Amino acid sequence: MARHDVTGVLLVGGASRRFGSPKALARLDGETLAERAHRMLTETFAEVVVIGKRTDALPLPFPVEDDGSEVRAAIAGVVAGLRRAPTELAVVVPTDLPYMTPAFLLELADAADGVAVAHPDSGPLPGAYRRTALPVLERRLAAGELRLWDAAAELGARVIPGNSEVLRNVNTPDDLVDP
């Protein structure tokens, strides 16, 4: 049963410089990476918000909300997702983690108990972010301090062990082929 106290936030607005085309539209096992991530989030959380860039006009089968920023950085998506989340806690996932599991997302949500941010040792995304993190994230975004790593550190993030298979991301089309 999906958790109602956490919002799943999917980020689909990456620049995809190394990939060469929008990662959200890349296909794996018959579905786009965005569809795959969205399906996993909706299986895990009752509320799901998708954040991207309106100007990208990605042809996806679910609504994508504009992040309201000219900046292409994950921090802009996290800020937009937290602003739109109907819950205090949001688990934020980039579209390029096709091997993510509901179990790991729930582990992240649980790890955020009593802290503003929880993320795996591999980095700040995926991550569980509380609305209380917004002032720091908004300040950093406005100041052009775009490294989410630094924002998570400032917020005293709880870092949990990651699973390299679950956290394997896609940077090039070759990454979509099993090693």
Image (spheres, rainbow, N blue to C red):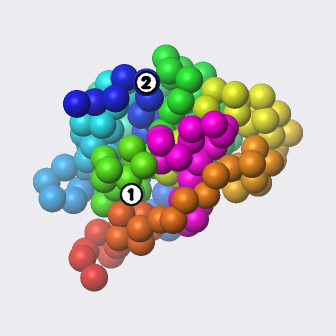
Q: Position of residue 40 (x, y in %)?
A: 27, 43
Residue at 15% over, 59% down: 29
Asked if the residue at tag 2 contacts the one at tag 1, i.e. Cβ–Cβ closer than 8 Å, the answer is: no
Q: Position of residue 100 (x, y in %)?
A: 34, 55
Residue annotated with mark 1 = 97
Q: Residues within 10 Å of mark 2 (few under 14, many from 20)?
A: some
Q: Amino acid at mark 1?
A: Leu
Q: Is residue 52 visible?
A: yes
**27 or 40, nearer to the observer:** 40
Q: Position of residue 51 (x, y in %)?
A: 48, 33
Residue at 21% over, 59% down: 28
Task: Give the residues drawn in magenta, as a range.
Answer: 108-124
In the rendered image, residue 98 lying in the magenta stretch gets the answer: no
**166 or 146, nearer to the observer:** 166
Marked residue nearer the N-terminal end (1 or 2): 2
- Residue 26 in the figure: left or right of residue 8: left
User: In which quadrant is the N terminus drawn?
Assistant: top left
Residue 72: image quadrant is top right
Q: Amino acid at mark 2?
A: Asp
**Secondary structure under badge 1?**
loop
- Residue 144 in the figure: left or right of residue 18: right
**Secondary structure under badge 2?**
strand
Q: Position of residue 142 (x, y in %)?
A: 81, 34
Q: Residues within 10 Å of mark 1 (few under 14, many from 20)?
A: many
In the rendered image, residue 119 lying in the magenta stretch gets the answer: yes
Residue annotated with mark 2 = 5
Q: Is residue 39 above or below residue 107?
A: above
